[in-house]
Image (spheres, rainbow, N blue to C red):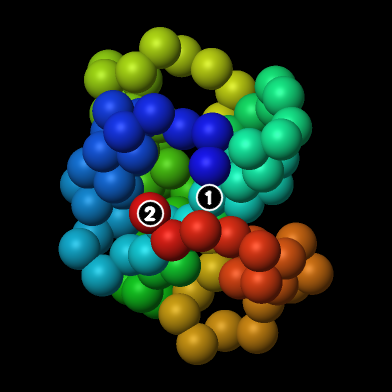
Amino acid sequence: MRLTAEEVQAIKAAARRAFGADAVVRLFGSRVDDARHGGDIDLHVELPATVNFSSAKEGFLDRLFARIDPQRVDVIATVKGATPRPIEAIAYRDGIVL
């Protein structure tokens, strides 16, 4: 996994504040593979139906970039128990829970 311990902690803390304690965050995409280089940070958040993802996402990114250098971060979400879209299925299959 190509994230520093500081980045992982910042992601987890920002997610907890923005999406709630029940949210599960996964890293997926190229940053999962230590042999690859570059790439943005692809995150999948599994959250309760009570969370409005669109409004919470902005707060998440603001909190995250207060702790780490701004960079390209893509965030997708699935409501717990919902049928995942194809990209979300990839995150479930290949992602690493942070």
The quarter of the picture where the C terminus appears is bottom left
- Disc 2 crowd rating (10 Å Cα; few below 14, some 14-19, many 20+) is few
State the image coordinates of residue 8 (x, y, percent, origin top left): 34, 39
Amino acid beneath label 2: Leu
The kind of residue on which mark 1 rests is Leu
Residue at horizontal 23 percent and vertical 60 percent from the top? 20
Mark 2 or mark 1: whose residue is earlier in sequence: 1
Where does label 1 land, which residue? 27
Residue drawn where x is 53% and y is 42% of the image:
1
User: Which residue is rendered at x = 54% and y = 17% of the image?
Assistant: 71
| Residue under numbered circle 2 | 98
Out of 84 and 96, give the one closest to the viewer: 96
Q: Nearer the viewer, residue 41 or 60?
A: 41
List the single residue furthest toward the top.
69
Q: Could you tell me if the residues under marks 2 and 1 are in contact, i.e. CB atoms within 8 Å?
A: yes
Q: Would residue 18 be visible to someone looking at this image?
A: no
Q: Secondary structure at mark 2?
A: loop
Q: Position of residue 74 (x, y in %)?
A: 61, 38
